[in-house]
Image (cartoon, rainbow, N blue to C red):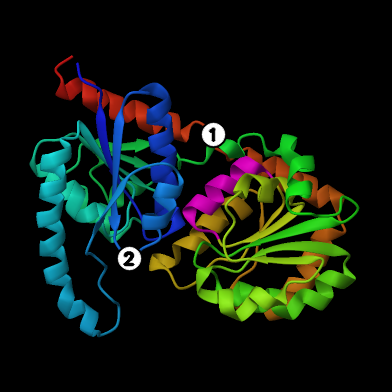
Amino acid sequence: MRPYKFIISGGGTGGHIYPALAIANELKIRYPDADFLFVGARDRMEMEKVPQAGYRIEGLWISGLQRSLSFKNLLFPFKLISSLIRSRGIIRKFKPHAAIGTGGYASAPLLRVASNKGIPCLIQEQNSYAGITNKWLSNKVQRICVAYDGMEKFFPSEKIKLTGNPVRQDLLDVSSKRIEALQFFNLRDTKKTLLVLGGSLGAKKINELVEKSLPFFAKSNLQLIWQCGKFYEAAYKDKGSGLVQVHTFLNRMDLAYAAADIIISRSGALSVSELCLVGKPVVFIPSPNVAEDHQTKNALAISEKKGALLIKESELEACFEIEFLDLLNSEEQQEQLSENIKKLAKPNATKQIVEELEKLLYTSQGS
């Protein structure tokens, strides 16, 4: 039989892109001769990140509906029709054996066309509250891999497989990379390192908190790796100093995690999955501006098991410095959080997702 061809779509944010890349990398290990093609939204970050990871990508003219009244919404039907037509052309030319979607606008037309052509389709939902794209596709695809229990309220129960979220395999043993990480970021091994993460695009409230807290962190003898995000590069790039490193984006997340002693982070699904694997003390500051407040639910699932601290944005002014200082000064609390969050990790999620895809391939071939 000729080598497998896999078409993969997921993008808009790192939370959709990195699971897609993790799945592709696992497939590549199992099928070294396989051919891969990614499909993304042509003006989104996947058009840059996917080629950086060594894969080809095609772009669609597609975006989501705006929540507020907007001229862009008038273009949506035309974008969708255009993307469906282009997806048909891409699939006709590439002839994939299977299609994988990890969420994001572009996966909607691509997986819809693939399913209509009888190509085995699998989607992966990262969050506890399903995205609109995956809900729209759920009746068409054969398998839905999820990271949380109770997803039957969004998807047909017979299609659901609880696997966890795919994570980058270079995060499996970050503890062994500590010395390399300190050298990479030019950090001192005599100081504790705080890693601040706001997601690939950035988090306004977290950035404001960090800027305001710089004197507090300095007084606490901390050095910072501060990932401010794409949207806030201009505002914060010049805030760096000897002990404060400001990065728009972190290409070596494994080394950032390895260098960190304490982490402040949003609680998007992918971040939570990675942080469980990394096993460092975490302070979650969920974004309240997401569907069904799912970041708070993600963080609660960890904090209720004493695996992390959770501070809501509305409580930062009153609580942050007190709770953070308590954590910083208590080695016992740091160890407890680390041990408990590690227990919640699902390190084999990517392998399980690929095994589900293989079952679909074998079924489609009648074997």
What residue appears at the point 12 percent right and 62 percent down from the top-left corner? 82
30 and 312: which is toward the camera: 30
The CA distance from mark 2 to mark 1 is 32 Å
What residue appears at the point 75 percent right and 63 percent down from the top-left corner? 224
Instruction: Tell me the kind of residue under disc 1.
Output: Pro
Magenta segment: does it hold 53? no
Q: From the top left corner, tell me how far across and down residue 301 is, in percent.
A: 55, 52
Magenta segment: does it hold 278? yes
Residue 129 is marked as none
Instruction: Tell me the kind of residue under disc 2.
Output: Asp
Q: Secondary structure at mark 2?
A: loop
Q: Residues within 10 Å of mark 2 (few under 14, many from 20)?
A: some
What's the magenta bit mostly, secondary-structure-wise? helix
282 is higher (above) or lower (below) than 176: below
Choose top left, top right, bottom left or bottom right for residue 208.
bottom right
Q: Which residues are magenta?
A: 267-279
Q: Does residue 147 appear in the picture of this structure?
A: no
Q: Is residue 264 left or right of residue 47?
A: right
The residue carrying mark 1 is: 347
Q: Secondary structure at mark 1?
A: loop
Q: From the top left corner, tell me how far across and down residue 105 is, in percent.
A: 27, 60
The residue carrying mark 2 is: 43
